Structure formats: structure tokens, C-alpha cells
Image: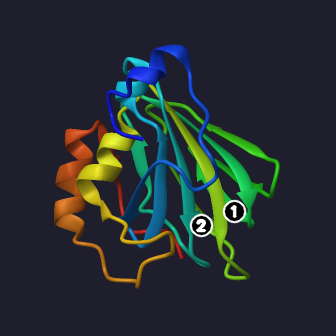
Amino acid sequence: MNSGNPAAADGFVMAADEGRAFWFLNTLTINKVGSDDSQGRLSISDHRVPAGFAPPPHVHDTSDEALFVLDGEFDGFCGDRSWRAEPGALVFLPRAVPHGYRVSEAGPGRILVVVSPGGFDQFVAAAGEPARDLRLPEPVPPDLARLEKLAAAHGIRILAPPRP
């Protein structure tokens, strides 16, 4: 799905592996609904993550985030509250509250990431690279200085390295 899809005004259906796929922070992230598709109201991404994956703790200054767990087990925090989520669970992460998560070492995970207003899809595209195929990329250490700069440009503050 390309940004600015004229079919977005009439709605659309996407198959499981359709969308704009990126290798993003050692994950496969498929942007299903982009900001341009929703007049900036939201973005929806299919986020496929390896065992043990944890993004740096962060804060979305201007957007709310929801994670719907499709596969795997996730442990996380939002503010001072810890949580655990398994398939079928929904995690709501309000704007301006520090949060993070880690997928279990027992296996990979998969979540739908819904962010409102939109823009997360643009961050994924800026910080990632187009996926050459629909698999997890070979892991490489992230360039944290570059990530922090790109995140800040998209209203996201990186707080610290992931919790152990």
C-alpha cells in the first residue's frame, strides 16, 4: 500500500502480508494503514519481532498507542505499572507516559501497533529500510544517536536502553 492511496477514502482490505514492509530495529514491520491513508488520524502496523526483542523505553509526546498481541508473550511497563500480555490481549499506552516492553525469550512475537494520531508509519519508514523479503532481518546494533534524532522528529523521546 502506497501512501496517498486513493482507495483509502472508500476503505480497503489488505491480506496478511500486504502493506509497506520495513526492517526496523531488527524487526519486520509492515505498515498497513499509513497516516496518508487516514488523513493523519492513525497508523496501523503489523510488528513482527524476534525472541527477546525490546525497543528502548520511550514516550510518545503527542500520540496514544495500542498494542494488540497476535503471537508471543510480552512483558512491559507503562509509567509505574508493569503488565504482561499474551495473544488476544490489548495494551493501551497513553501519550506522555513512559513505556516499553520485551517479548519473551521463548519465541518471536507479533503485535498490531495502532497509533493515533498517525505518524508512527512515517517514523518506521525513516528509521528502517525497505524489507527485501518478509522475514526478520539479520540483527545489527542500532545507531542510537540516529534513532534518537529520527524519533524526536516524530514526537517520540527515547529515554534509556531497554530494561534487562
Q: Which numbered circle lies on residue 102?
A: 2
Residue 62, horizontal then vertical, whole percent: 37, 27
Indicate left or right for 155 with 162 as reference: left
Estimate how packed mark 1 is, as few (under 14), some (14 to 19) or many (20 or more) residues with alpha carbons within 10 Å.
many
The one of 45 and 60 positioned closer to us in this rendering: 45
Does residue 63 lie above or below 86 as drawn?
Answer: above
Q: Amino acid at mark 2?
A: Arg
Does 12 appear above or below 147?
A: above
Which image quarter holds the N terminus? top left
Does the residue at mark 1 contact the one at mark 2 (Cβ under 8 Å)? yes
The foreground one among 159 and 56 is: 56
Residue shown at the point (24%, 59%) measured from the top left: 147
- Determine whether 45 is above or below 128 in the image: above
Left or right of residue 87: residue 49 = left
Count of residue discs: 2
Q: Earlier in the sequence, mark 1 or mark 2?
A: 1
Residue 41, image x and y in percent? 44, 20
Query: Amino acid under label 1?
Result: Phe
On the rendered image, what quadrant is the C terminus found in?
bottom right
Give the residue displayed 41% in from the left and 62% down from the top.
Answer: 56
- Residue 140, which numbered label? none
Mark 1 sits on what residue? 74
| Label 2 secondary element | strand
Q: Is residue 50 left or right of residue 144?
A: right
Q: CA distance from mark 1 to mark 2?
A: 6 Å
Quadrant assignment, res 84:
bottom right
Q: Can residue 108 be seen in this snapshot? A: yes
> Does residue 62 show up?
no
